[in-house]
Structure formats: C-alpha cells, structure tokens
C-alpha cells in the first residue's frame, strides 16, 4: 500500500482557504493510515506560525496526532547527502545557478530525497521545483490532488 507525505504548501493553503481545508481534511481522513508527516514540513510550518495561538493550533491539529501515531518521516544522513548532490548536479547542468538557488529549494531537495529513499509519494502543488529535482532524482510526486486521489 502506498504511503504519502503532504507538502507544506498544501497545509498553508488549507490554513488560508476553507475549500482547501475541506479538501485536505477529506484527503487526510481517506488516507489516514498511509499518511506521514515529514520533519522538514514540520519545520517549515512552525517557522511560519509566528504567534503562540497559530503554533498551538498547528501542534494540536496536525503535529501531535501524527507524532503520537509514529507517522513521521525524518531524513536520514543518506537523504541529506543526496539532497546536496541533487542541488550540485542541477547547478552543474545549469538548471540552477549558484547564486539563484531559491531559499526553499534545499528543503524541497531533502523532502524529495527522503521520500524517494522511503518509497513515499509526495503530494504537492510545487510542480516547478519537484519537476526540476526529478531531472536528477526520479521521485514519485502528485500535483493534481484532491481532484484525482492517488491510488492506494
């Protein structure tokens, strides 16, 4: 059975938009046993929760329930190393420039490398970055959710 990681951009969208929140909630209920929370996504979400109320809501509604169930994906040393290799190769092939690496791109490379290593499908709307990463590291990612739910 496939396992999934939801990228931070979808959680952020759900925080800002009721229909997106409903879609994410429906997806989460349907795929709960197969849903993992990525450590990098947690870091990005907590960094964006700039007040205590937002952090508490994030902990209560997302982080703590998945932590308690052990549904976490934490990058290994090998994934960290591979993320660096992905970035270096993209620069070498001129798909990125040394001075033009977007601030979030190293996180995306780490998410991609660790999802690939663990055989997990990434659900994201950041097709540009992950398509670029896929030039070096073939990863399983889906961008058309929830309109088309991934196959179980």
Image: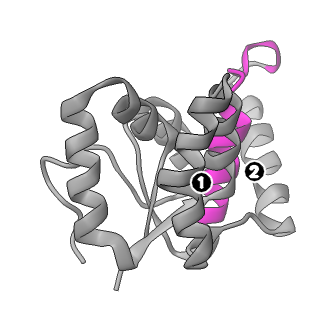
Q: Secondary structure at mark 1?
A: helix
Q: Which residues are magenta?
A: 98-116
Q: Quadrant of residue 72?
A: bottom right
Q: Secondary structure at mark 2?
A: helix
Which residue is under mark 1?
Answer: 112
Looking at the image, residue 105 sits to the left or right of residue 21; the answer is right
Q: Is residue 112 magenta?
A: yes
Q: 16 or 74: nearer the eye?
A: 16
Whether the residues at callouts 2 and 1 have beta carbons within 8 Å, the answer is yes
User: Does 63 appear above or below 2?
Assistant: above
Residue 152 in the image: x percent, y percent?
24, 78
Query: Residue sitting at 77 percent across and 33 percent down?
Result: 92
Query: Residue sitting at 62 percent across and 69 percent down?
Result: 67
- Asked if residue 109 can be seen in this view, the reply is yes
Which residue is under mark 2?
Answer: 83
Cα gap from disc 2 to disc 1, whole angstroms: 8 Å
Q: 75 or 11: nearer the eye?
A: 11
Q: Quadrant of residue 70?
A: bottom right
User: Does 37 appear above or below 96?
Assistant: below
């Amino acid at each position: 059975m496939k396992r999934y990681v939801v990228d931070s951009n979808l959680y952020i969208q759900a925080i800002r938009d009721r229909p997106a929140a409903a879609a994410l909630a429906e997806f989460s209920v349907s795929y709960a046993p197969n849903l993992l929370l990525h450590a990098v996504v947690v870091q990005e979400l907590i960094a964006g929760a700039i007040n205590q109320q937002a952090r508490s809501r994030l902990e209560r509604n997302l982080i703590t329930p998945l932590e308690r169930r052990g549904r976490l994906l934490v990058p290994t040393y090998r994934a960290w190393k591979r993320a660096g290799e992905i970035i270096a190769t993209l620069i070498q092939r001129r798909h990125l420039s040394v001075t033009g690496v977007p601030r979030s791109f190293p996180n995306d490379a780490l998410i991609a490398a660790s999802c690939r290593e663990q055989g997990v499908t990434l659900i994201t709307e950041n097709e540009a970055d992950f398509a670029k990463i896929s030039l070096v590291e073939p990863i399983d990612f889906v961008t058309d959710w929830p309109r088309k739910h991934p196959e179980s």
